[in-house]
Image (tube, rainbow, N blue to C red):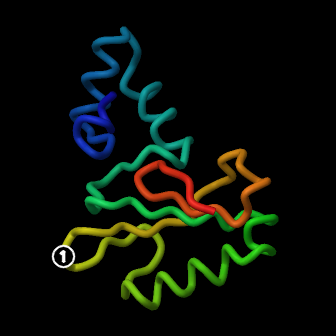
């Protein structure tokens, strides 16, 4: 909920979750830092994720990621200077039959 409202999981958002769910801030932080889909800093209007796990990498995910890095002029978890696009490696999203998988704002493209 915090990420969908703020665009990332901020410290303030984690404190809000802890208070609302009657958890410690450490418990909320543990979840927010363990799962790769939770962003802990602001990102661009378009969150572009390329799966580079084994199958997607073999099927071209690494090449797609490298091409996007070069085209956008950013590295992993970096945002373009205009603040529009953030590029990141993503973990397997259980869409292996569509490999290689690219996601833009959580919508799959194969």
12 left or right, relative to 31: left
Q: Is residue 86 above or below residue 71?
A: above
Q: Is residue 41 above or below residue 4?
A: below
50 left or right, relative to 55: left
55 left or right, relative to 51: right
Can you give x and y, in whole percent of width and height, for residue 24 in the image? Answer: 39, 19
Q: For the view shown, which residue lies furthest in the top direction?
A: 22
Q: Nearer the viewer, residue 44 or 59?
A: 59
Q: Quadrant of residue 110?
A: bottom right
Q: For the view shown, which residue lies furthest in the left direction?
A: 82
Q: Quadrant of residue 72?
A: bottom left
Can you give x and y, in whole percent of width and height, for residue 86 in the image? Answer: 36, 67
Residue visible at 44% across and 44% down in the picture: 38
Q: Is residue 45 above or below residue 23?
A: below
Residue visible at 65% across and 47% down in the picture: 93
Q: Residues within 10 Å of mark 1 (few under 14, many from 20)?
A: few
Q: Nearer the viewer, residue 51 or 8?
A: 51
Q: Element at badge 1?
A: loop
Counting labels gives: 1
Q: Quadrant of the N terminus?
A: top left
Residue visible at 57% across and 66% down in the picture: 50
In the picture of the structure, the residue carrying the numbered disc 1 is 82
Residue visible at 30% across and 54% down in the picture: 41
Q: Nearer the viewer, residue 19 or 89?
A: 89
């Amino acid at each position: 909920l915090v990420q969908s409202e703020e665009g990332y999981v901020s410290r303030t958002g984690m404190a809000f979750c802890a208070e609302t769910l009657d958890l410690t801030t450490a418990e909320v932080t543990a979840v927010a830092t363990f799962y790769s889909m939770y962003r802990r800093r602001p990102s661009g209007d378009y969150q572009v994720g390329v799966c580079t796990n084994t199958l997607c990498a073999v099927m071209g995910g690494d090449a797609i990621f490298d091409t996007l890095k070069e085209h956008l002029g950013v590295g992993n978890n970096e945002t373009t200077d205009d603040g529009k696009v953030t590029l990141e490696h993503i973990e397997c999203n259980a869409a292996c039959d569509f490999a290689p998988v690219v996601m833009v704002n959580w919508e799959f493209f194969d």
